[in-house]
Image (tube, coloured by chain):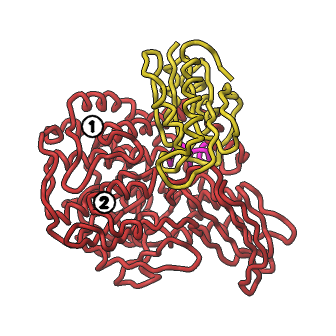
Chain colours: A red, B yellow
């Protein structure tokens, strides 16, 4: 990473081992103590504008390009918005297949986050040399652990490839259903992976739980604060990723709201903006902005769900919930929640392989535009995702609104960076530079959320980098710039 | 000797997608397998281990002429966490999946990475030359400069 104190401002840019481009600014007072910190998302994608004028049937293919890590989530949310525009209920086989790719997406994305991005910190230590804190450091320390992680991600990617032709930006789903029938040969291939996948996830779970005691300061000070949590649940309050209602709980675990219709998200979720970041700041309308902020993603989902519905994951959820008398509020436990979700995903994938409806012939409901407004929602790996389209009589998009999962954690990430900076950085005496391990902890605080800042069009290999130093009165006193190659 | 040809690059960014054109120019055969990817990821490591030779094909903005080189086996670390270099993938393939074959990288000179599906004429010409050179490699002729 690149970080240097200039004129009472420490900028960490780029933030490493996350998906996408971001920087962290830490403002110091004259004594060198942390005054405030901010997490800036420095990408501008503009997909809401790109969608205008396009046929709504194209949206899943276009919107999948929002991200190269979680394209399936955008495809599904977009497809569901299209279902609503058509006014159809998709056939059971299509619904099962969409659920299948959603679990596969969850598995591969979480495997990437845990094994490739975060486990170098967890297994090698936050203070390990920077040049070792990557999968190659892991390769030296524990090649079998790394191999399991690569194979787990490969399993999820393979399912996506089976259903959509390729693992990145697959063509697996569209308005009205899915594009191909699922075969028994495909089932047999997937079932062949299950024993190894289960074993690998359980190994990862045991390993992580054995390490947690060694990270007590990080657990206590990396995003440990009360907040609300938002996630999708099914009819009996269980964990749900494809279709359900939304539940919001507070830090005590008490329900703030439930039975919320995702198609009417705009009635209870608002979006504010701040001038230091391109990402919006969503909030729960009844509580206003900024008080109405909340967290989404694995930690939130396990906090709002009463159970998972699968045997092994239910056992882990019960143990997870015992970490707190209310909701589990420590953001460090996103890692544990992520691995529990991986376990649940493998169990659900196996169940789906033994579900007769998955193999039925009908995979597409046919209709033309029957509504001018459609909303689709699903649980992406990083949290609840909404796609909202307005169309004209010909089905051309006139307006689009995307409420992205990572954006809903924006406020939490800012507070997390501030908390971590105050605790671990504390004070930088004049004329000194901060310890690299300390800076890694501030980055690692962000990695708890596994933010996906959209990197699918990043083609050339060198991130643009701007470092500014700002005087006390807010004026830019200097700037250096490295352009994208 | 069976060969895996891996073309990487964004086909929607002009010359960045020229590697995929190389695969189109290579005649089908029984002793090679082609793979087109947007970027190199660790999941390729296991597949590579099943072959006795791998050739990575990619656009290169710093090259003025076509080059096919052996992959250097020292570990480098990519700043990009979602993509890896040929050297890194080969290292993973060796260490985790027992790959012990030959590894080459074919670098196609490229200059225009603006949005669009068609590489430049110059890049396409280099792609044709690359296909010939790689074809020779596959047939056991070694690297043709």
Residue A441 visible at all = no
Callout 2 and callout 1 share a chain:
yes
Circle 2 Cα neighbour tier, 10 Å, few/some/many (<14 / 14–19 / ≥20)? many
Q: Is residue A283 above or below residue A457?
A: below
The residue that disc 2 covers is A77
The residue to which callout 1 is attached is: A350
Residue situated furthest right in the rendering: A431
| Residue A333 spot, x, y in % from top left | 49, 56
Residue segment shown in magenta: A113-123
Q: Residue at x 51, y 20 (%)?
A: B3
Give x and y (percent) for residue A389.
Answer: 29, 69
- Which image quarter is the N terminus of chain A in? bottom right
Q: Residues within 10 Å of mark 1 (few under 14, many from 20)?
A: some
**Position in image of residue A423 (x %, y %):** 66, 67
Check residue B91 for magenta coloring: no
Nearer the observer: mark 2 or 1; the answer is 2
Label 2 with label 1: CB-CB less than 8 Å:
no
């Amino acid at each position: 990473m690149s970080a240097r104190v200039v004129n009472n401002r420490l900028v960490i840019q780029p933030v490493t081992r996350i998906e996408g481009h971001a920087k962290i600014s830490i403002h110091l007072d004259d004594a060198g103590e942390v005054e405030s910190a901010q997490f800036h998302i420095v990408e501008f994608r503009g997909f809401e504008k790109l969608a205008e004028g396009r046929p709504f049937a194209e949206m899943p293919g276009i919107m999948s390009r929002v991200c190269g890590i979680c394209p399936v989530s955008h495809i599904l949310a977009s497809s569901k918005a299209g279902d609503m525009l058509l006014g159809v209920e998709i056939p059971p086989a299509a619904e099962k297949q969409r659920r299948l790719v959603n679990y596969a997406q969850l598995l591969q994305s979480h495997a990437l986050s845990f094994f490739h991005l975060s486990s170098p910190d967890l297994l090698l230590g936050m203070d390990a040399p920077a040049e070792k804190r990557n999968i190659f450091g892991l390769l030296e320390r524990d090649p079998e652990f790394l191999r399991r992680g690569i194979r787990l991600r490969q399993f999820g990617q393979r399912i996506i490839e089976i259903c959509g032709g390729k693992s990145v930006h697959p063509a697996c789903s569209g308005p009205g259903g899915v594009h191909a029938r699922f075969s028994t040969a495909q089932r047999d291939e997937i079932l062949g992976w299950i024993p190894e996948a289960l074993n690998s996830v359980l190994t990862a779970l045991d390993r992580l739980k054995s390490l947690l005691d060694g990270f007590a300061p990080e657990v206590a000070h990396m995003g440990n604060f009360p907040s609300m949590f938002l996630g999708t649940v099914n009819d009996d309050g269980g964990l749900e990723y494809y279709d359900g209602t939304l539940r919001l709980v507070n830090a005590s675990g008490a329900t703030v709201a439930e039975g919320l219709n995702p198609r009417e998200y705009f009635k209870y979720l608002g979006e504010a903006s701040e001038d230091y970041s391109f990402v919006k700041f969503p909030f729960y309308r009844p509580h206003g902005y900024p008080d109405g902020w909340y967290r989404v993603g694995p930690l939130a989902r396990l906090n709002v769900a009463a159970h998972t519905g699968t045997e092994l994951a239910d056992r882990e959820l019960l143990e997870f919930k015992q970490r707190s008398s209310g909701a589990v509020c420590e953001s460090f436990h996103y890692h544990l929640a992520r691995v529990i979700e991986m376990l649940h995903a493998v169990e659900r994938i196996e169940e789906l392989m033994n579900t007769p409806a998955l193999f039925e012939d009908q995979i597409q409901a046919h209709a033309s535009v029957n509504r001018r407004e459609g909303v689709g929602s699903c649980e992406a790996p990083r949290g609840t995702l909404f796609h909202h389209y307005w169309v004209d009589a010909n089905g051309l998009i006139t307006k689009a609104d995307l409420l992205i999962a990572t954006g809903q954690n924006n406020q939490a990430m800012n507070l997390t960076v501030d908390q971590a900076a105050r605790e671990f950085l504390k004070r930088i005496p004049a004329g000194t530079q901060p310890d690299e391990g300390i800076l890694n902890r501030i980055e690692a605080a962000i990695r708890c959320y596994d933010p996906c800042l959209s990197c699918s069009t990043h083609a050339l290999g060198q991130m643009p980098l701007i470092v500014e130093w700002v005087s006390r009165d807010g004026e830019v006193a200097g700037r250096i710039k490295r352009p994208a190659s | 000797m069976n060969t895996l040809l891996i073309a990487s690059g964004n086909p929607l960014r002009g010359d960045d997608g020229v590697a995929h054109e190389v695969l189109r120019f290579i005649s089908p055969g029984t002793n090679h397998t082609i793979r087109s990817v947007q970027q190199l990821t660790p999941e390729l490591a296991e597949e590579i281990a099943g072959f006795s030779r791998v050739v990575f094909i990619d656009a290169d903005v710093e090259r003025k002429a076509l080059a096919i080189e052996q992959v250097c086996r020292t570990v480098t670390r990519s700043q990009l966490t979602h993509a890896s270099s040929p050297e890194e993938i080969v290292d993973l393939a060796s260490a985790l999946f027992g790959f012990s074959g030959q590894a080459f990288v074919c670098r196609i000179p490229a200059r225009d990475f603006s949005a669009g599906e068609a590489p430049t004429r110059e890049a396409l010409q280099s792609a044709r030359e690359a296909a010939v050179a790689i074809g020779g490699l596959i047939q056991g002729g070694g690297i043709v400069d």
